[in-house]
Image (cartoon, rainbow, N blue to C red):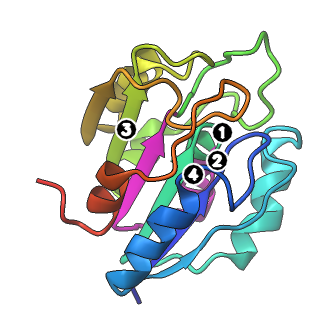
Amino acid sequence: MKNAIIFHGTGESPDDQWFPWVKQQMEKAGYTVSVPNLPQMNQQPIAEMVSQVLPTLDLNEETVLIGHSAGAPFILSILEVSGQKIARALLIAGFYTEIDMGREPVLQPQYDWQKLAPLADYYMINSTNDPWKCDDTQGRLAFDKLGGTLIIKQDGHFGSASHQQEYKTFPLVAAIAIGAYQ
């Protein structure tokens, strides 16, 4: 079954930024899409978050996972614990090392990159000018470990209420998610 799950970042909700628009585009393409509300994102320890959320997910080889900001490392933890191969993982403005002086509970102390690499086709989309430091350096780190496709833009955090960056649509993410990206 073609399905997708979009994970928002810290302090966000399913109705923020480009999440509803990408959900709608994927549904038009025949996907069943969910955007879970995770108010404890990056506040609760990652092991607790994964143990609560993983049993609610329907993961299979046609699943697409999309994560924004803290949602990106959350996806890696979901995949590492489940071991489930999926179609694609889109890691948007993701980070994989501490960016807030040791206050990133969504991060694992270390990732099993060798285990993660074959579990998905990875797409990392990061900016050179991300105000939260979820920048191209973070994208390159994931790319070097996971392979896949690295896309570097100069477009901030791809949506941030606190930085007044509205991002209501995201055609690039929709195209990659449905498999139409060339």
From the image, tell me which residue sits under label 1: 70
Separation of marks 1 and 2 at Cα, in angstroms = 6 Å
Q: Secondary structure at mark 3?
A: strand
For label 4, count other residues whose C-alpha is less than 10 Å away and answer few (under 14), some (14-19) or many (20+). Answer: many
Q: Secondary structure at mark 1?
A: loop
From the image, tell me which residue sits under label 2: 74
For label 1, count other residues whose C-alpha is less than 10 Å away and answer few (under 14), some (14-19) or many (20+). Answer: many
| Callout 4 amino acid | Ile
Side of 39 where 31 appears, left or right: left
Side of 30 where 157 appears, left or right: right
Separation of marks 2 and 3 at Cα, in angstroms = 14 Å
Q: Which residue sits furthest top?
A: 101
For residue 80: magenta? yes
Q: Are marks 1 and 3 in contact (CB under 8 Å)?
A: no
Q: Are marks 4 and 2 in contact (CB under 8 Å)?
A: yes
The quarter holding residue 52 reads bottom right
From the image, tell me which residue sits under label 3: 124
**Rendered view: 26 above or below 115:** below
| Callout 2 amino acid | Phe
Separation of marks 4 and 3 at Cα, in angstroms = 12 Å
Q: Are marks 4 and 3 in contact (CB under 8 Å)?
A: no
Which span of residues is magenta-colored?
74-93
Instruction: Answer with mark 1 or mark 3, whichever residue precedes in sequence.
Output: 1
Q: Are marks 1 and 2 in contact (CB under 8 Å)?
A: yes
Q: In the image, which disc is placed on residue 32?
A: none
Tag nearer the camera, 1 or 4:
1
Question: What residue is rendered at 25% in x and 42% in y?
Answer: 148
From the image, tell me which residue sits under label 4: 75
